Image (tube, rainbow, N blue to C red):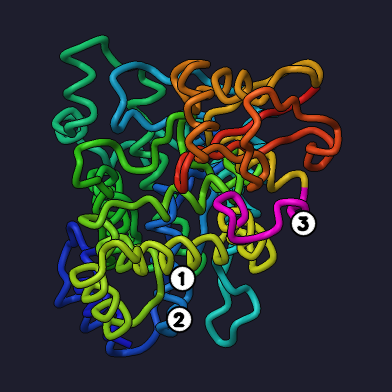
Amino acid sequence: MTDILDDLAWRGLIAQSTDLDALRASMAKGPITVYSGFDPTAPSLHVGHFVPLLTLRRFQLAGHRPIGLVGGATGLIGDPSGRNTERALNSSDIVAEWVERLRGQVGRFLDFDARPNAALMVSNLDWTGELTAIDFLRDIGKHFPVNRMLAREAVSARLSGEGLSYTEFSYQILQSYDYLELFRRYGCTLQIGGSDQWGNITAGADLVRRIEGAHVHALTLPLITKADGTKFGKTAGGALWLDPEMTSPYAFYQYFLNSDDRDVIHYLKVFTFKSREEIEELEKAVAERPFARQAQRALAEDLTELLHGKRELDAVVAASKALFGQGALEELPAATLGAALAEVPKAKVESLGAAFVDLLSDSGLVESKSAARRAVKEGGAYLNNVKITDESYVPTSDDLLAGRYMVLRRGKKSIGGVEVG
């Protein structure tokens, strides 16, 4: 039962902890209950939430009981951590809708039928909604020294800038109360979360100690960064979401397929369940054959299947190959093809009639019409993986894929598209 801590340490997944030796000793006595919380600040979780989600799963696979908490109450308030300005408060109806969406996403990573450590899913509105303001202030608020709350980095930074409302100032108390309730109801003795949540998590552990006299634990996970200095999980279109309607499975797959060699082994440790031996083999492949991108493919395939399932993985792999001439474009589902072309330079036209060279230029795949004509003349221009040698060629309806798309290619690696209608 204690091997999980050694595995987390090897994967670089321990940022801070209250007392690892005490936690290890507690786990040596038998399974524990561990939770992590997810606030509905958007209609979907994003890829950064993968770290605590998969860590909950690791604990369950190691024999412990995980609790996924969705913040039906805290989502109405807003966490000031990592923000320079006050959050805009969403309506209770919107938050309730997002809670249900997040429940589904969190639930994909936990096993609710495992015995004897079946996962639990809860909303903190279940207990916070029953509190009166007087009970909250008398029974909970009295245990929070204001000077200690003011010393929190998230609070002090806001107070020296635009200020902080009492609403967001109270967030730490609400999150701490979650830990107390989960300890009382389910015997939960470990909370995990991102390293930016250290103050909130340790405040919860302290509240349990003050009221129940029990020693519980806190463990935070590092925030993921990229070697090139850009923010992890950000794309040209915004955040990398777990909802396939907000980030397509194809875009999700391509994001990890394009991982930097300097990042990919770290990502394999953090985001996959591959063994140390498997990851070390992939690390060797990166060093010896970086051009093969074996580690990146393993990462992208594992994560896409984990989140979206085997069918979607097969579809995006087929699309990825077909775009570069290694498969039949005609066999791709319209949704997958559209998602793939959303990630490349694309021209949108109302109807057919433009010459192929004009479409090459308009898509942005080449810098000008003269460059498009040159590409055709040199034999490096393709329409739906068919080489075009006639500079005057005008695509017809027979060239449309799924009735509306065309795939353009320049050389072996530069892909573009056309959408008609």
Closest to the observer: 109 or 382? 382
Q: Amino acid at mark 3?
A: Glu
Q: Is residue 384 left or right of residue 57?
A: right
Q: Residue at x 26, y 64 (%)?
A: 290
Q: Can you give x and y, in whole percent of width and height, for residue 65 in the image?
A: 48, 75
User: How far is mark 3 from mark 1, CA to CA?
Assistant: 36 Å
Q: Which residue is mark 2?
A: 61
Q: Which residue is mark 3?
A: 331
Q: Residue at x 55, y 87 (%)?
A: 116
The answer to whether mark 1 and mark 2 are in CB contact below 8 A is: yes
Q: Residue at x 80, y 21 (%)?
A: 352
Mark 2 element type: helix
Closest to the observer: 15 or 251? 251
Decide whether residue 330 is among the magenta residues: yes
Q: Amino acid at mark 2?
A: Leu
Mark 3 element type: helix
Residues drawn in magenta: 322-333
Mark 1 element type: helix
Q: Is residue 89 left or right of residue 285?
A: right
Q: Can you give x and y, in whole percent of width and height, for residue 267 in the image?
A: 31, 60
